[in-house]
Image (cartoon, coloured by chain):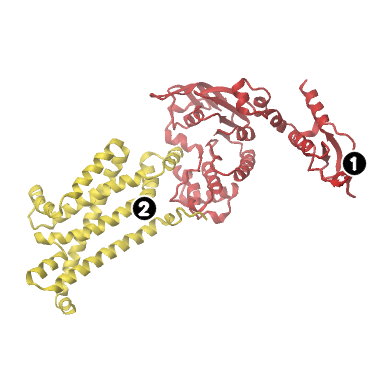
Chain colours: A yellow, B red
Amino acid sequence: MINYLSNNSEAVLAALRQHIVLALIPVVLGFLIALPIGYLGVRVPWLYHPLVNVAGVLYSIPSLALFVFLPVVLGTKILSPLNIVVALTIYTVALLARTVADGLRSVDFLITESATAMGYRRFRRLVDVELPVALPVILAGLRVATVANISLVSVGALIGVGGLGQLFTRGFQLFYIEPILVGVILSVLLAGVADLVIVLIQRAVTPWTRFQGSRA
Amino acid sequence: MITFDDVVKVYPGGGTAVDHVSLELATGKTTVFVGPSGCGKTTSLRMINRMISPTSGRVLIDGKDVAGQDEALLRRGIGYVIQHAGLFPHRTVLDNVATVPVLLGKTRREAREAAMKLLERVGLAAEFAQRYPAQLSGGQQQRVGVARALAADPPIMLMDEPFSAVDPVVREGLHREFLRLQQELGKTIVMVTHDIDEAIKLGDEVVIFRQGGVVAQVGTPQELLADPADDFVAEFVGRDRGLRSLSFDTAAGLPVRPLPAELVVDDAGRPLGWKSADGVRPTGGTFTSADTLRLVADLAILSPVGIAVRVDADGVADGIAPHHDLADYLAARRS
């Protein structure tokens, strides 16, 4: 395996880079799109259940089907990385829109009430109070979405763009175990590191959660 | 002055919450809305800062209808304290207190400096400033809630059951603190409670609501105890209102008798107890002329001989009041 790595370091690194880009751009895009959608699901109460249902249906579409189907809808080339990005963004939105809505719904009524009574207008209350208080729930969803994306990118290898997934297809085609092992280990490591980074961010931006439930 | 002008609140399908209420709440005084649950007291309070809009009628602050004012700006000028304090869990104590000044455009730094002074004012040590609400006890959170409401120095404070989520001992301390603060600050305070004792203790004026959002009686605590408007109010203020009304008078006018030989005093003249067959029995306490008649009555009842002992500022006994003297005094005062 060491031999394989030293002989193919450039190809492996390129695959890793592509994997990171393909997994993380959808996380960022999906998060930004999910914020307003999730908020709508709270602001307009009757939208919440349709939102949860549509999100559930979207998330249940098999990824390979979506990868193949998207070029037809978007008019992109079948080998375009854009297909992967769009598909994973859809999954991320499906996952996070519900998380954002649930996070905002979890904010204690007393807290929003007292914010209003102190003279917050709606938008500033959302940004200054509701979103920060919902952040632990939202970040937990972001962890799931990130790890899921990292594993889904590999499936893209079946249509020719798949970051570390290409190492699997190469290994299968050549009946050669080393690239498969490298691919598996690197994608697991990548998922672990990404998860850890989000946990560290969460600790940094929500220091107050450490005291919840324990009174000094 | 806060004015309720023939205010009605009807909820769609939910009946009448507030039924033709007209009130005038004096500036610089504490007015307490009290009544059983579902009597419209909280609804009335929340109409002052437009958290709820009346179905008909007007609420005015210093003659200006609140309905015509910008909601957010109006609320920034009115302090608001709720049960459980409603603190922001993601902000430190200091930043919670600084909330409204920051909304009003103060820099965070200015607002924090002012907040620090306020914490001291409500009796919280500086070490609490950097803690989060979850690290505080219920009583401490409530103090922070009061500091937060006071932060922008609003002329009006609305308090919705501010002390009902804490245990009786803590509540007692918060009551003392509240009375001390109000003496210093002289805010126009409107407080809601379901506890008539709290209302009598803290209110300059008390508004008793009954079911259906009707005002049953408005008056000072003394007036309500001495002269309830009807059976509902009499029932609500409680069976022992006669005894409680004694809390509003001092013993200054109560005549005392000279010290009898049975009262044992020390060399300085401080009372030690009453002589009896089996030694000296403790007096059970003493009163000064500044104490309330309620304390005198209590002492007379508890005393082994039915006599309360008065002392001067140095604790030297200077007279006694047997319970029948107290009864005669009260009877003479009433006629």
Of all residues, the one furthest to the right in this rendering is B261
Residue B288, given in percent of the width and then of the height, sits at 80, 39
Residue count near mark 1 (Cα–Cα under 10 Å), binned few <14, some 14–19, many ≥20: few
Amino acid carrying label 2: it is Pro
Res. A44 in view: no
Q: Nearer the viewer, residue B101 or B166?
A: B166
Quadrant of the snapshot with the N terminus of chain B: top right
Q: Nearer the viewer, mark 2 or mark 1?
A: 1
Where on the picture, by quarter, is residue A101?
Answer: top left
- Provide the secondary structure element on which disc 1 rests: loop
Q: Is residue B296 above or below residue B211?
A: below
Q: Nearer the viewer, residue B213 or B219?
A: B213
Q: How far apart are the alpha carbons under marks 2 and 1?
A: 72 Å
Residue B163, given in percent of the width and then of the height, sits at 56, 40
Which residue, given by chain and number where applicable, does mark 1 sit on?
B262
Which residue, given by chain and number where applicable, does mark 2 sit on?
A136
Q: Residue at x 49, y 25 (%)?
A: B59
Q: Residue at x 70, y 29 (%)?
A: B245
Q: Residue at x 58, y 34 (%)?
A: B195
Q: Residue at x 28, y 35 (%)?
A: A46
